[in-house]
């Protein structure tokens, strides 16, 4: 069965450093997403990406965040200057259509120290 | 604004018991509702998706129902097993763009 692949599985970074989280969505999917889950809290939407541009973003997704689909297969989330409160599990997901068929990756656990 | 709530937050049952997990949503104009399973420190595995036109959906020992008018869904797990221990999340798409709104989950523990 097709999978969404995320790398790395764990990342520890110092406050203020830039991090790039990587995802390979399912190849024939058209919609791509990033979500995050702070320990003990709900899974929260960050951003959706369709047709090579951001289609929607949450209040969390401020100027410190950016997404790219540089080569037609990878989908990346960059955090420019990490803060302690960015520590969370980050999930990538893709879907063939916007409203169903989501497949989530296994996540990247980001720890900012 | 769509809000999704799940009760109970945690549930512990002996092996073999049938159980029901509850999910409620405030805006009944949904496209579908999806149930996910999350193992500790892991990703989200899709279990069942119910379209807005459906009343229920079944997969093995799992049965999910949907009552749009009352803003509720239930996940029924028959003959629970220790391997069912996980957190169960329900989610609805907020719009056609696919932003999912999640509940906070029910942490299920099935004791041998």
Image (cartoon, grey):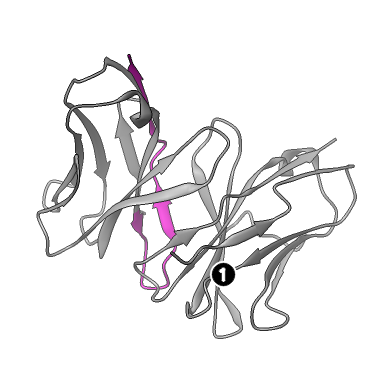
Nearer to me, B48 or A100: B48
Residue B1 belongs to the span the image colors magenta = no
How far across and down, in percent of the image, does residue B44 sit?
A: 47, 48
Is residue B71 in view?
yes
How far across and down, in percent of the image, does residue A21 sit?
A: 73, 58
> Which quadrant of the figure has residue A46?
bottom right
How far across and down, in percent of the image, does residue B51 sit?
A: 20, 63
How far across and down, in percent of the image, does residue A25 sit?
A: 56, 69
Quadrant where the C terminus of chain A lies? top right
| Horizontal side of residue A73 vs A45, given as left or right | right
The structure residue drawn at horizontal position 55% and vertical position 56%, both measured from the top left corner, is A105
Magenta-colored span = B92-112
| Horizontal side of residue B14 vs A8, given as left or right | left
Quadrant where the N terminus of chain A lies? bottom left
> Circle 1 — which element?
loop
The residue to which callout 1 is attached is A25
The structure residue drawn at horizontal position 18% and vertical position 62%, both measured from the top left corner, is B52
Nearer to me, A56 or B61: B61
Depicted A68 relative to depicted B17: above or below = below
| Horizontal side of residue B27 vs A38, given as left or right | left
Nearer to me, A5 or B72: A5
């Amino acid at each position: 069965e097709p999978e969404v692949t995320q790398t790395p599985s764990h990342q520890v970074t110092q406050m203020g450093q830039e991090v790039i989280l990587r995802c390979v969505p399912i190849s024939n999917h058209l919609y791509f997403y990033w979500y995050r889950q702070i320990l003990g809290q709900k899974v929260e939407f960050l951003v959706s990406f369709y047709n090579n541009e951001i289609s929607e973003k949450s209040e969390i997704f401020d100027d410190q965040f950016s997404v790219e689909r540089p080569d037609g297969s990878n989908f990346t989330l960059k955090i420019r200057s990490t803060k302690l409160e960015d520590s969370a599990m980050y999930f990538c997901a893709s879907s063939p259509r916007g409203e169903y068929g989501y497949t989530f990756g296994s996540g990247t656990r980001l720890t900012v120290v | 604004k769509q809000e999704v709530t799940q009760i109970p937050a945690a549930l512990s049952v002996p092996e073999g018991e049938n159980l029901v997990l509850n999910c409620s949503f405030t805006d009944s104009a949904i496209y579908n509702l999806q149930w996910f399973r999350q193992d500790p420190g892991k990703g989200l595995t899709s279990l069942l998706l119910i379209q807005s036109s459906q009343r229920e959906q079944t997969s093995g020992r799992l049965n999910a129902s949907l009552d749009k008018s009352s803003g509720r869904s239930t996940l029924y797990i028959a003959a629970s097993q220790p391997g069912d221990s996980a957190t169960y999340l329900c989610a609805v798409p907020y719009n056609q763009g696919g932003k999912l709104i999640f509940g906070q989950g029910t942490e299920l523990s099935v004791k041998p």
